Image (cartoon, grey):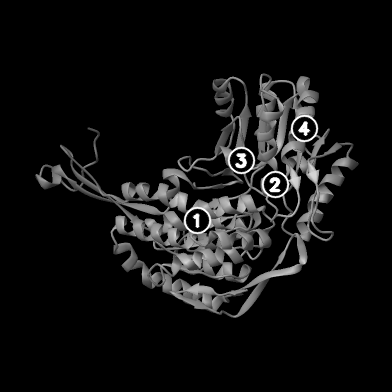
Amino acid sequence: MNIPLWVDGQPVQGTGDIARENPARPGEQVGTVRTADAALTGETVGAASAAFPGWAAVPVAERVTRVTDAIVETSAANGERGPLLSRELGKVIADVQGELGFALALARYDGPVAQRLCADKVLTDDEGTLITTVDPYGVIAAITPWNAPVILAALKVVPGLMTGNTMVVKPSPLAPLAVTDFLSQVARRLPAGVLNVVNGGADVGQALVGDPRVAKVSFTGGLTTARHIAATAAHHVRPTVMELGGNDAAIFLPDAEMDVETLQRAVFGSFLTSGQVCMAIKRLLVPAARRDEFVEAYLEAARRVLRVGDPLDPASTMGPVISREHQKRIDALVQSGRDAGGTVHDLGVYEPSSDDGYWVRPTLVLGLDDNHPLVADEQFGPTVPLLTYDSVDEAVARANSVEHGLASSVWSADEQRAVDVARRLDAGFSFINCHNRAGTSLRASFGGRRSSGHGREFGEAGVAEYVQTHSINSPAAIREKRALGNAYPVAG
């Protein structure tokens, strides 16, 4: 399988290719995608720029219908597309099918929101007439990661297109196959140049973000890349949306339920997609007096729901990690925890389907302090440290002590008490008695603070990121010749 780029309404072979191996069986090549260079990237931005006026002029209701219909038709092939995504990423097949269905769910939510946001707002009163129009930016550069490639592309493409922007998407080289195929099939059902897909490395990303015809950049990924993108965008004074990493704390309050059924939710909160999720639980904070109770129930919960094995096996709930480099990094973190005197508990049923895959046994690590790299940094893999605390104030302070501020969760038998504690957490999103995917909602805006980025996805705020306002004001005092040109505004 060799998947072309999609530029200006046509498949394009580009200048090279990226081969993708199967993380469960690294000797198996899953397929290739064609790549762009800086020149082709510039041509692609040009196509998107040329298509923008026509697409922006399409009534919003029609844009919503056309984008939704394109996703419906493309999603009809998700049954065949699923194994491709599973094989290139190592994500278990049940999760893959959920991911591929996300774009359609998002389109059905975002459509009415886009129509409401894009409508003019007219206010007429004694002060005069104020018209507020809502307009698209123009060409959006979307740079997406590998861990949920279709979901994280959809979160940019669906609201971006519905609100009248055109787009150039650059997927991650680590999982480009299924998302390039999915987006290309959507793009072919829309006018030429409205949606384009280019693949490549940092040079392509730099050419895309640095093009002065790009009006806004939407990026999901790591902090190092984010700094480069921000600096390049700043040169042209272009706005950005950045959803970066997290070091999410899950605080179990002294009255939290710690039965096996409850802790199954916590296990999934850490280990979905082998822990390679920005909003996964990265630190467990548990009352010192209840540590042993928690550990016993957590180990049993993991035994029930964690099964590491072939991603294409419906019984597997966790596959390999994305690469050999990532495997070595996680193994080294866990070993450093042992060397520092930590206690490492293996979790779940471990039945890897090959000898050379990028498998990592999920682990719970006890006895580390807050300065250990496994606690202080985002591990982004299938290991989680358990920390104990003596007071809720201490737990909140430690949860807030890291540079990241993406997500968090609070667990309590008293929901209002959990909410009260969540209000004290310096995060963009807080879950109550759950964490990660089960606690998200299409209506709930999601995004980070501090080193976890800025801007929002999901919800009305996620759609609003792709529009800008234009105020047209006709003051009554000017119309009625009651004011000179040097008057100050007044309230009321």
Tag 1, which secondary structure? helix
Q: Is residue 365 visible?
A: yes
Percent across and percent down for residue 206 are 57, 68
Viewer-side residue, 380 vs 397: 380
The residue where tag 1 is placed is 154
Mark 3 or 4, closer to the camera: 4
The residue where tag 2 is placed is 317
Mark 2 or 3, closer to the camera: 2
Residue type beneath disc 2: Thr
The residue carrying pointer 4 sits among few (fewer than 14), some (14 to 19) or many (20 or more) residues within 10 Å by Cα, namely some
The residue carrying pointer 3 sits among few (fewer than 14), some (14 to 19) or many (20 or more) residues within 10 Å by Cα, namely many
Q: Distance between the Cα atoms at labels 2 and 3? A: 15 Å
Percent across and percent down for residue 214 are 45, 65
Tag 2, which secondary structure? loop
| Image marks 3 and 4: residues in contact by CB distance under 8 Å | no
Q: Distance between the Cα atoms at labels 3 and 1? A: 18 Å
The label on residue 1 is none
The residue where tag 3 is placed is 436
Q: Distance between the Cα atoms at labels 1 and 4? A: 36 Å
Q: In which quadrant of the rendered view does residue 219 lie?
A: bottom right
Residue 146 lies, with reference to residue 44, above or below; the image says above
Q: Is residue 240 visible?
A: no
Percent across and percent down for residue 269 are 66, 39
Q: In which quadrant of the rendered view does residue 54 lie?
A: bottom left
The residue where tag 4 is placed is 300
Q: Distance between the Cα atoms at labels 1 and 2? A: 24 Å
